Amino acid sequence: MSAEAVPFHTIPEPPASVTAGTILGRLADGIGFRFRWASEGLKDSDMAYKPAPDCMSMGEQLDHICDLLATVSKNVGAPQRPPLPQPAACAQLRARVLDLSADLSAWFKRASEEELASSTVKSRGDARLFWNMINGPLADCLTHIGQILSWRRLAGAPPAAADVFRGLPPKGF
């Protein structure tokens, strides 16, 4: 598969209008783009790496990001995907995160204000309002993507630097 065929080679063009849904869709685009380039080149052999004993492994990070996006997807009513085999391979986790980011982007961009306002996210047994999706699982995805970038640097395998401000791939990709 060519580099361009994998979702989020570049960040999509901005939507024509500014609404709550298009803003959230752009956040999902940013998550997908940042994750795509943070995880580019990771292999199954990288999944056990962790910088300290009390940290999640790289594989656990990818799995957690996947779970966060799947939780948001399920709670807003976006299309669901079948479960991954356990344990999932690096390529499977990576593809799932990118697909979930794309699914959420599309769902958010076409969601009505009423659909967004009535969405809740369940966490630790109780339902929270839609707003908690932003400061909860969506923001947490960005935290964990940053950890992947940091851990790759600590492991001596830094990823190529994408231009996250302009949404462009690293030079040479």
Image (cartoon, helix red, strand yellow):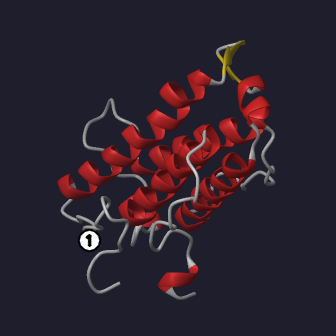
Seen at 72% across and 50% down, the residue is: 107
Horizontal side of residue 57 vs 171, given as left or right: right
Secondary element type, mark 1: loop
Seen at 79% across and 54% down, the residue is: 81
Q: Say if 25 sits above or below 10 in the image.
A: above
Q: Is residue 63 visible?
A: no
Badge 1 local density, few (<14 within 10 Å), some, or many (20+)? some
**Residue 93, quarter of the rendered image:** bottom right
Q: Say if 62 sits above or below 126 in the image.
A: below
State the residue lying farthest toward the front: 17
On the image, the x and y values in percent for residue 127 come to 72, 15
On the image, the x and y values in percent for residue 11 come to 46, 66
Q: Say if 170 sits above or below 82 in the image.
A: below
Residue where numbered disc 1 is placed: 160
Look at the image and tell me in which quarter the C terminus lies: bottom left
Q: Relative to the observer, which residue lies in front, 95 or 106?
A: 106
Seen at 57% across and 59% down, the residue is: 15
Q: Relative to the observer, which residue lies in front, 79 or 56?
A: 79
Amino acid type, callout 1: Ala
Q: Relative to the observer, which residue lies in front, 32 or 49?
A: 32
